[in-house]
Amino acid sequence: QVQLIESGGGLVQAGGSLRLSCVVSGLTFSSYTMAWFRQFPGKEREFVAGISWRDGYAYYGDFGQGRFTISRDNAKNTVYLQMNDLKPEDTAVYYCAAPGEAFRGSYYISEFDYWGQGTQVTVSS
């Protein structure tokens, strides 16, 4: 059974930082591209950042470049999202996700079959 368990969300003031973690079990973590998405109330989930299984190459959505950093620790089966200079518009539920198959390289949301429960990030102004 595949499980993705996020942690690290919370309330932070604008300009602050948070680091989200996602511990994965039930699959060969090192063989899976991983990603973070976020969802605003009443909106569809949007891509935040992804990291390749092959070489650890990171890819970011338009708003995250320069403020967000995705990383992974294959020894700990964990993917991280470091978020700096947070803004009120970053307030959302953040989800980590894994695709349905190993060795995939796409970041389209339709590729991701496994999801965590989500962690709330709230940024106050």
Image (cartoon, helix red, strand yellow):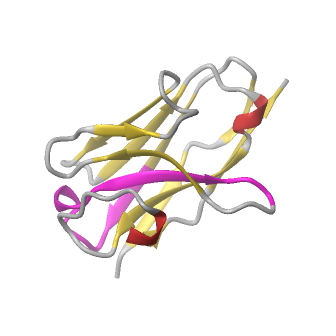
Q: Is residue 112 visible?
A: no
Place of residue 41 in the rendered image (x, y in percent of width and height, measured from the top left): 80, 58
Instruction: Give the camera-side residue of 109 and 37.
Output: 109
Taking the image as shown, residue 60 lies to the left or right of residue 89, namely left
Q: Position of residue 79 (x, y in %)?
A: 36, 47
Query: Extreme right residue here?
Result: 125
Does residue 93 show up? yes
**Residue at point 69%, 40% (across, down):** 10
| Image quadrant containing the C terminus | top right
As for residue 30 lying within the magenta part, the answer is yes
When asked about the image quadrant of residue 101, the answer is bottom left
- Counting from the top left corner in percent of width and height, residue 99 is at 34, 68
Q: Is residue 104 above or below residue 55?
A: below
Name the residue rendered at 47%, 61% in the picture: 5
Q: Residue lying at the far bottom in this picture: please name it.
A: 1
In the image, the segment drawn in magenta is 22-41
The N terminus - image quarter: bottom left
Residue shown at 67%/63% (left/top)?
44
Q: Position of residue 67 (x, y in %)?
A: 52, 23
Q: Is residue 18 left or right of residue 2?
A: right
112 displayed left or right of 31:
right
| Magenta segment includes 35 | yes
